[in-house]
Image: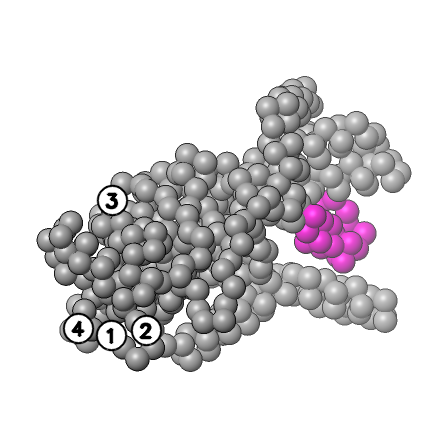
Amino acid sequence: MTTTPSRDFDRPVRLHPLTYLEEGEEVTVGRPDIDSYGLFPPDGAALLRRLEAGTPPNAAARWYTEEYGEQVDMAEFLEVLEELELVVQDGEQVAAATGPVRWQRLGTIVFSPVAWVLYGLIVLAAVIAMIRRPELAPHYQNLFFTRRSLVLLTLGIVLGQVPWILLHEAAHALAGRRLGLNSTLSISRRFYYVVFVTALDGLVAVPRRKRYLPMLAGMITDVLVISGLTLVAAALPDTTGATAVAHRLLLSMAFAVVLRLVWQFYFFLRTDLYYLAITVLGCNDLQTTARQMLRNRLMRLLRRPERMVDESTWGERDRRIARWYSWLMVAGYVFLTVTLLTAAIPTGIRLTEVAVHKLDADFSPANAADVLTFLVLNFWEPVFAAYLAFRAWRRRTRTTAPTAKETAHAAG
């Protein structure tokens, strides 16, 4: 082995406390305190365990050669570990062992057997109520709970979903924290949709069978919200007065949650069902592999091989699934594009015409404020989505090749 001025390969390497998860032909290794993980082949994980046990790099390299009959570039191996932030740097404290995370006990209670029985009873009661009173069942007319004000109608549809969206994401977070995982909430974009995203990077270090609940917790919560709103609406008189408005508003919010639940089936937008599917299929980063496969097909067609992506970075499982998934992804984006051109844009034009007609019929400060607020509430999402897309494009143009840590996070 050769040495560099910055490291003595005959001295042990200090590593932070690591977790190992062996699944198939890969081992996920990482630091749960900062959610930094990487995928290693079994022999690479064995070498890492050797280093963690205190074996100096040179001695570990000799052991690897004796055990597997191959030589290892220890300098490169240690560089990968440093990029994953697994190595304790000079002057850095060794990470403390992770303990219980906040809200872990609440997550255990929310997803306890008693809670599941209660949830089942709520859904059953809602189904019975819809059968007995079909007008309670979700249908698109429920969205229009008032005709008195465009702003009031839009506020009910748009802002009325905010608490249920946050509850959806909170369910993901609690299901993850029940397993001792940290979580973060951010705003992102899926094509021309603006979405809230709960990141549970630590799921990659959890046995596969335990990942399903955190992935499905949001959709389960949506079903419970629909059921709860329907039951409360059923208990309110729907004749006249404030209770009638509340009755219609609750049913309007319930139908909007149904639409968000249906949106989850757009799996090619990396929805909850996408992550469920790649977990069941045993993939690591199917979306990226499929995108790169499509890019390479296009570059071959254009005879631009120098712009093709290196296919050696793809996992074998991802490669096999991406052969057919990539075409489904294309079909999905074509469908959404057609929907945008034939439905979303014409609807936006029609809404603008309605607003302008309303303003032309009765121009007053109050009416102008009503129309302006209506337009802002209806068009903020595509405008904000376009801004996020532009910001992501600017970031990509300034970013160099991904580091090992970024690749590990993408694999998760």
Relative vertical location of residue 63 with respect to residue 105 in this rendering, above or below? below
Which circle, 3 or 1, is nearer the viewer?
1
Which circle, 2 or 3, is nearer the viewer?
2
At 42% from the left and 51% from the top, the residue drawn is 18
218 to the left or right of 364: left
Q: Quadrant of residue 348?
A: bottom right
Residue corresponding to mark 1:
3
Alpha carbon separation for disc pair 1 and 4? 37 Å
* Amino acid type assigned to the residue bearing label 3 in the image: Glu
Figure disc tally:
4
* Amino acid type assigned to the residue bearing label 2 in the image: Arg
379 to the left or right of 238: left
Mark found first going from the N terminus, 3 or 1: 1
Q: Does the magenta stretch include residue 146?
A: yes
Q: What stretch is highlighted in magenta?
A: 138-163
Q: Residue 25 carries which label?
A: 3
Is residue 275 something that shows in the picture? no
The spot of residue 189 in percent (x, y) is: 51, 61
Seen from the viewer's position, the closer of residues 34 and 165 is 34
Residue corresponding to mark 2:
7
Is residue 402 something that shows in the picture? yes
Q: What's the image's color scheme?
A: one colour
At 36% from the left and 69% from the top, the residue drawn is 402
Relative vertical location of residue 276 with respect to residue 109 in this rendering, above or below? below
The spot of residue 64 in percent (x, y) is: 19, 54
Mark found first going from the N terminus, 4 or 3: 3
Mark found first going from the N terminus, 2 or 3: 2
Q: Residue 305 carries which label?
A: 4
* Amino acid type assigned to the residue bearing label 1 in the image: Thr
